[in-house]
């Protein structure tokens, strides 16, 4: 499980830590200095902030792979992404022109049928900028209350990939909310 302490990685450091990039044949992208910080959420998130985040991000969605269920924003301004049993779901977002972006990963409130299942509401989330992973994948469960702060530094593309972490997918409704986007 991800430690709630401060995490700051450059793309190059993250690739070295997780052993990625071996298949890359092109030169590093401009975003080689993109950074990610994962910190606890400070206070309640306002619907106005999340609506602003949705307004910025929604038209920037350029591609997606839906494994189980649709990838779409709900009435609470959260982007729902459900992983498949063996295949990840992902969304590709154009972040050209954005300098920073705050994201809030969590699991949608569990139904009564899922609440007593300890495997319910657990996913693995990968964040990539310009095709390069930022840090190790995050374990997200029903108790996750983190803020992902991205410093994009000229990045063009953000990919959020959600995978099954434990073999049980029926209750793994992951949602990503977006806050401040500058």
Image (spheres, rainbow, N blue to C red):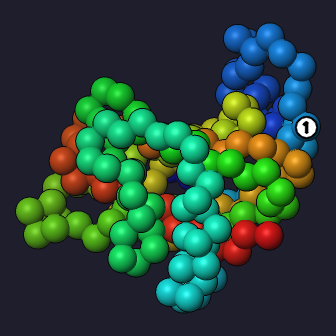
Q: Is residue 119 visible?
A: no
Residue 29 location, quadrant: top right
- Identify the residue shown where x is 31% and y is 36%: 67
Q: Is residue 12 left or right of residue 128?
A: right
Q: Secondary structure at mark 1?
A: helix
- Identify the residue shown where x is 22% and y is 53%: 171
Q: Position of residue 162 (x, y in %)?
A: 45, 43
Pick the residue in front: 146 or 180: 180
- Identify the residue shown where x is 31% and y is 27%: 86
Q: Position of residue 113 (x, y in %)?
A: 8, 62
Q: Position of residue 150 (x, y in %)?
A: 75, 58
Quarter of the picture containing the C terminus is bottom right
Disc 1 residue crowd, few under 14, some 14–19, many 20+, Cα 10 Å: few
Residue 78 location, quadrant: bottom left
- Residue 176 higher or lower than 132, as above or below: below
Residue most toward the left? Answer: 113
Residue most toward the front? Answer: 59
Q: Is residue 121 left or right of residue 35?
A: left
Residue 38 location, quadrant: bottom right
Pick the residue in front: 45 or 94: 94
Q: Is residue 20 left or right of residue 112?
A: right
Q: Is residue 167 visible?
A: yes
Q: Which residue is mark 1?
A: 30
- Identify the residue shown where x is 71% and y is 43%: 157
């Amino acid at each position: 499980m991800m430690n709630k302490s401060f995490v700051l990685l450059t793309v190059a450091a993250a690739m070295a830590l997780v052993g990625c990039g071996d298949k890359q044949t092109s030169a590093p992208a401009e975003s080689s200095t993109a950074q990610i910080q994962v910190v606890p959420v400070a206070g309640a998130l306002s619907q106005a902030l999340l609506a602003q985040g949705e307004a910025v991000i929604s038209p920037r969605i350029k591609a997606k792979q839906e494994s189980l269920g649709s990838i779409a924003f709900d009435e609470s301004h959260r982007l729902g992404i459900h992983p498949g049993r063996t295949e990840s779901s992902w969304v590709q977002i154009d972040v050209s022109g954005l300098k920073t972006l705050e994201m809030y990963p969590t699991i949608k409130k569990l139904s009564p049928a899922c609440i007593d299942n300890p495997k319910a509401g657990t996913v693995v989330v990968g964040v990539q900028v310009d095709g390069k992973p930022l840090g190790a994948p995050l374990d997200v469960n029903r108790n996750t209350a983190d803020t992902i702060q991205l410093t994009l530094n000229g990045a063009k593309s953000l990919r959020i990939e959600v995978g099954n972490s434990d073999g049980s997918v029926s209750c793994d409704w992951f949602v990503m909310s977006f806050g401040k986007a500058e």
